[in-house]
Image (spheres, rainbow, N blue to C red):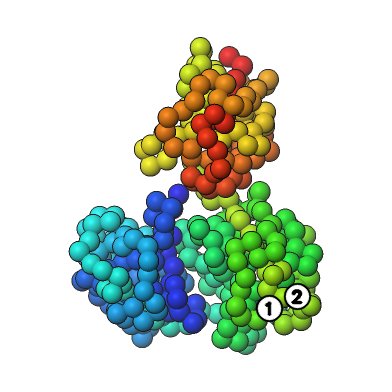
Amino acid sequence: LGKTLRLFGGRTPYEGRVEVYHNGVWGTICDDGWTAKDTAFVCEALGLSPQNASAVSGSPYGVATGPIHLDDVSCVGNESRIDQCRHNGWGNHNCGHSEDVSVNCSAHFSLFIFFRVDMFHSSFFNRMTLSQKSVSEITTRLAGGKTPYEGRVEVYHNGEWGSVCNDDWDGNDAAVICRSLGFPWQGAQSLRWAFFGQGLGPIYLDDVSCNGREKDIQHCANNGIGRHNCDHKQDVSVRCLPFWSITTRLVGGQTPYEGRVEVSNNGIWGTVCDDGWDDKDAAVVCRSLGYPTQNAASSCCAHYGQGSGPIHLDIVSCNGTETDIGQCPNLGWGIHNCGHHEDASVSCSP
């Protein structure tokens, strides 16, 4: 899972507290040793211009509450990710949140607008510069989620962030949002009724209708900017599937082809809850282990005994064609309502 970078707390997409996503948690960067080269790296990594960019300390965009991930960062300028810059190591610092670094970048990138929305996101450090077709400026983000891959859909227009109404919103619309943000879109989940909380700004879009094949939401039909009959209780959200490659093993079986499903996260083995677990999920596990998938069978209720580690995954929902369980929709690492008596198991054909 790639590291992710964002600016948080600013009134525009061009400013904010610098935050990085690591081990499932957003965290800040201490300003010790921070230089103009570091500021330029952040702006360029986010697709913004480093010209006249500046760094700010002293929590001008609010005091963070999460961990401080990095300290003494020193970038040369040829790095592709911020963790490739010299630093003290993840979590090693002597700072408080009053020393969190923030930056102001120049809004020197053009946006492709057709009275709809376009994309802006910091995922995987892959950035895009879009051709200009209108003087209007609208960008897209996901807000309120626990990970970068989920949240309330918001668009930036005329200097303000606003939400999207869930009238006619479905999986095709969610897929287009995820694709435009650079996230995997197969299995994208459409979440209605302010699933990640209600927005505070205007409601910009309503009756969005995508066929799922559009490159971005600007090509989907909608009522036009600001035309709606909704309130914020109807704010729409999406959950995109992150790129995961999960190490899997079977434990407790009498043969190598059967057992309790365990997956490794940050070097710790844990189990999978059996909520929604079926033979399609079993087939994906078998395939990822190099075993035949024909007649792959799922088992619930700790059929091969209860695990003792954490429960890593819940509500796994594979279509059966995935090569790795990490490609299947799920609630995210560590999010579950299960006990080990619900550990999932599989049996693969030898």
Residue 146, given in percent of the width and then of the height, sits at 50, 58
Q: Secondary structure at mark 1?
A: strand
Quadrant, the C terminus: top right
**Residue under pointer 2:** 230
**Residue at horizontal 78%, vertical 67%?**
167
Q: Is residue 345 above or below residue 39?
A: above
Residue 161, given in percent of the width and then of the height, sits at 58, 79
**Residue at horizontal 70%, vertical 61%?**
192
- Disc nearer the start of the sequence (1/2): 1
The answer to whether mark 1 and mark 2 are in CB contact below 8 A is: yes
**Crowding near pointer 2: few (<14 within 10 Å), some, many (20+)?**
some
Residue type at tag 2: Cys
Q: Nearer the viewer, mark 1 or mark 2?
A: 2
Image quadrant assignment for residue 16 = bottom left
**Residue at horizontal 72%, vertical 81%?**
225
Mark identifier at residue 124: none
Is residue 104 visible in the rendered image? The answer is yes
Residue type at tag 1: Ile
Q: Is residue 210 above or below residue 226?
A: above
Residue 21, given in percent of the width and then of the height, sits at 41, 59
Residue 157, given in percent of the width and then of the height, sits at 61, 82
Q: Residue furthest top?
A: 254
Q: Secondary structure at mark 2?
A: loop
**Residue under pointer 1:** 203
Who is closer to the viewer here, 188 or 132?
Answer: 188
Q: Is residue 245 above or below residue 94?
A: above
Image quadrant assignment for residue 37 = bottom left
**Residue at horizontal 65%, vertical 53%?**
188
Image quadrant assignment for residue 338 = top right
